[in-house]
């Protein structure tokens, strides 16, 4: 009997766990899922929770019954450390976990594994920006967040209070975007500002709002991917024009190339790529925090700390990427990992946000003061799910003795991504932007000029994209609940 | 008082020489198509086809 342990049950981890449980169901092999959360959360729809259009129950569900049905062992616990060589007492690899639920809160356990998938996702590093966090790693008191369903509920309440004040004649300033120079996930903030704008229109108070976007992107529409180019109306059009048009149409201002370095009550201080230090006031602010690894440690058989061997300095797990430091001009698609296998310990893999990217996708930039202001690579959603499935396909082949090497690959330089950013939730009101990009990491040798396949990289705005967003919401929750036909819904 | 041009209502909020004046702003026809149910049904099918092709190309 072999055991696969999966750390994390987000999009990547849950996809991996679901397929592993299905493909290993006829064997004696075990699938163990370790996650500190009792609920699964379809994070893209947190945006709708954050404007009061959805309830938490519509974007979450209990994990325990789903894993019971799948035949996977579920441990509501957080991973603390990995011993890939075992310890003085055992030669088997194991992971140490600490329970957060199941009536075992605070208890520790060592779980031996034959294969390990690290899909822990990010630590929301609010404290990286003074005032954005509370000093204990949680969201601070001055801003709101939509990173979790509970954060989104809080955001919705604050938004409702703000709208109520606007109805009484008070003019309000909205500030939405990124809360640090090294953030990723601009797309979530992008979608949130358009949903807020739509809600303010529906509530009849849009004329009482000054709306500003603030971002670490060097240009609007960078999205952490160095931007993209669409085939629109017979022109190759930059996402810069596409994004600027959306803001301009709605009368929203933007501040770009900004590193927010301090958040206070009603005010942020930020540094821009041209070195200026400025301030922006707000009455309502949603600023995405930077991400970091969850702080897993690693130890060798002698008990020595080998965290630096297994993880990159930012806490993400090293995989088969080329981590050689080199200038932007020398970056290659082949720098990006394909099998997502740890180079030192071949029975460990990392997927989704948990793997360490070799470098950003956007061109790195610094302010004259030396402050790096660079969007970090997005690796959530569709790419996460594809990585989860590819890695577990390889592992199951190895567990079944078919091979000793990974059989499937999932490089961000060889895959595309689809993104739908809504503005409102109605089926016949509001519009959404639907974008596809192929590949995620540009390949300027294969696709000179834009780095991407012009026919596979598209963007359009309309109700149809709204319907796609609704379709994705229901389809992926159906799939995640492992309801009949779930394997037919693609990642 | 001068009569306001019909299509100018779509851009009347844009200040000359502001960042917003340097990009494209949709006019009436484009806005109509974005919410025209018949046209959007066609686009819905098109987007789904595009995404399906993308998914097929991305799995290795």
Image (cartoon, coloured by chain):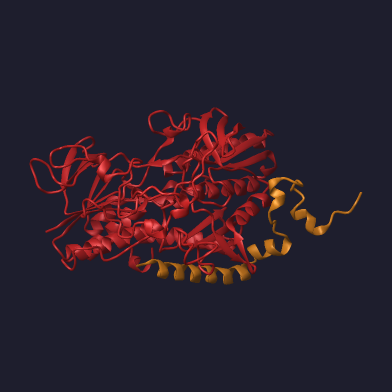
Say if residue A230 shows up in the picture: yes
- The residue closer to the viewer here, A301 or A188, is A301
Can you tell which quarter of the image residue A279 is in?
top right
Report x, y in % for residue A164: 61, 36
The residue lying at 43 percent from left, 50 percent from top is A43
Report x, y in % for residue A169: 69, 34
Report x, y in % for residue A360: 44, 49
- The residue closer to the viewer here, A109 or A130, is A130
Can you tell which quarter of the image residue A397 is in?
bottom left
User: Hey, which residue is sitting farthest left in the picture?
Assistant: A89
**Which quadrant, please, contains the C terminus of chain A?**
bottom left
Q: Is residue A434 left or right of residue A119?
A: right
The residue lying at 35 percent from left, 47 percent from top is A121
User: Hey, which residue is sitting farthest right in the picture?
Assistant: B1
For the colour orange, the matching chain is B
Q: Is residue A67 left or right of residue B34?
A: left
The residue lying at 31 percent from left, 45 percent from top is A38
**Which quadrant, please, contains the N terminus of chain A?**
bottom left
- For chain A, the rendered hue is red
- Count of numbered tags: 0
Q: Is residue A41 left or right of residue A219?
A: left
- The residue closer to the viewer here, A44 or A352, is A352
Say if residue A78 shows up in the picture: no
Report x, y in % for residue A423: 58, 53
Q: Is residue B4 left or right of residue A312?
A: right
């Amino acid at each position: 009997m072999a055991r696969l342990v999966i750390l994390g049950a987000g999009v990547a981890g849950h996809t991996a766990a679901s397929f592993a449980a299905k493909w290993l169901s006829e064997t004696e092999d075990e699938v163990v899922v370790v996650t500190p959360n009792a609920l699964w959360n379809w994070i893209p729809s947190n945006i709708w929770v954050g404007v009061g259009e959805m309830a938490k129950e519509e974007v979450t569900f209990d994990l325990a019954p789903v894993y019971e049905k799948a035949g996977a062992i579920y441990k509501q616990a957080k991973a603390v450390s990995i011993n890939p060589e075992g310890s003085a007492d055992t030669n088997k690899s194991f992971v140490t976990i600490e329970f957060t639920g199941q009536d075992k809160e605070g208890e520790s356990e060592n779980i031996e594994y034959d294969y390990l998938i690290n899909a822990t996702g990010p630590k929301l590093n609010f404290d990286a920006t003074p005032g954005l966090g509370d000093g204990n790693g949680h969201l601070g008191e001055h801003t709101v967040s939509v990173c979790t369903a509970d954060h989104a509920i809080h955001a919705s309440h604050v938004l409702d209070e703000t709208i109520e004040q606007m109805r009484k004649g008070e003019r309000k300033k909205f500030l939405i975007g990124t809360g640090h120079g090294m953030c990723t996930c601009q797309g979530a903030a992008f979608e949130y500002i358009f949903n807020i704008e739509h809600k303010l229109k529906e509530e009849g108070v849009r004329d009482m709002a000054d709306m500003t976007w603030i971002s670490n992107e060097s240009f609007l529409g960078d999205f952490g991917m160095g931007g993209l180019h669409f085939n629109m109306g017979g022109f190759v059009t930059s996402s810069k024009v596409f994004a600027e048009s959306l803001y301009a149409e709605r009368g929203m201002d933007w501040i770009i190339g900004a590193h927010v370095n301090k958040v206070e009550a009603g005010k942020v201080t930020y540094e821009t790529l041209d070195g200026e230090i400025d301030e922006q006031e707000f009455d309502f602010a949603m600023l995405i925090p930077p991400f970091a690894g969850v702080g897993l440690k690693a130890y060798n058989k002698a008990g020595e700390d080998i965290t630096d061997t297994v993880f990159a300095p930012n806490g993400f797990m090293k995989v088969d990427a080329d981590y050689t430091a080199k200038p932007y001009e020398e970056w290659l698609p082949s720098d990006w990992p394909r099998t997502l296998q740890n180079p030192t310990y071949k029975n460990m893999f990392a997927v989704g946000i948990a793997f360490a990217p070799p470098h950003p996708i956007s061109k790195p930039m610094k302010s004259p003061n030396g402050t790096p202001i660079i969007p970090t690579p997005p690796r959530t959603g569709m790419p996460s799910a594809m990585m989860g499935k590819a890695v577990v396909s390889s592992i199951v082949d190895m567990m079944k003795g078919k091979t000793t090497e990974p059989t499937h690959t999932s490089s961000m330089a060889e895959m595309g991504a689809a993104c739908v950013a809504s503005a409102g939730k109605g089926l016949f009101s509001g519009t959404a932007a639907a974008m596809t990009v192929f590949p995620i990491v540009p390949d300027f040798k294969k696709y000179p000029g834009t780095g991407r396949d012009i026919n596979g990289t598209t963007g359009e705005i309309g109700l149809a994209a709204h319907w796609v967003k609704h379709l994705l919401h229901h389809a992926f929750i159906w799939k995640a609940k492992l309801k009949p036909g779930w394997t037919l819904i693609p990642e | 008082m001068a009569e306001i041009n019909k299509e100018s209502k779509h851009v009347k909020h844009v200040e000359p020489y502001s960042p917003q004046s340097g990009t494209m702003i949709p006019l009436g026809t484009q806005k109509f198509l974005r919410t025209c149910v018949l046209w959007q049904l066609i686009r819905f099918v098109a987007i789904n086809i595009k995404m399906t092709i993308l998914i097929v190309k991305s799995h290795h």
